Amino acid sequence: MTPRYLQAVIKGKTQNDQNAWVIARQTAYWSILPHVGKKRLKPSDLGSFGWEKIEAGTVHNPYGTREALNEELRKFKELTETLEFKPAK
């Protein structure tokens, strides 16, 4: 696995996780909407996520911090060291 492929896998997993959280928040929003009366709500009123709090004018690194990326790489290396690769017969 190349570093570029590893970055793509990490980015894809992050996107999937974020999408799942957004869908859960949207489901909660639609579930409580009939019970709030005339009060105007937005899904973000139920809670905001860290990736939504990016200030205008800042550069967003989709891979996280260097430390987070190194930690993911360390976990990946530990996982691959525990696997046994046996040739097919």
Image (cartoon, rainbow, N blue to C red):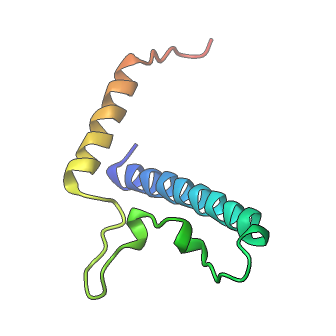
Tell me the residue at 44%/58% (across/down): 11
| Residue 7 percent location from the top left of the image | 38, 54
3 vs 31, nearest the viewer = 31
Q: Tell me where residue 39 appears, x and y as whole percent.
A: 66, 81
Residue name at image x 36 percent, y 48 percent? 2
Residue reaching furthest bottom?
57
Left or right side of 5 for 3: left
| Residue most extreme to the right | 34
74 relative position to 34: left or right: left
* Residue 85 against residue 44 in the figure, above or below: above
Q: Residue at x 32, y 25 (%)?
A: 78
In this rendering, is residue 76 above or below 44?
A: above
Observer-nearest residue: 83 or 22?
A: 22
Q: Quadrant of the N terminus?
A: top left
Whether 86 is drawn above or below 24: the answer is above
Residue 28 location in percent, x, y?
Answer: 68, 60
Q: Residue furthest front?
A: 37
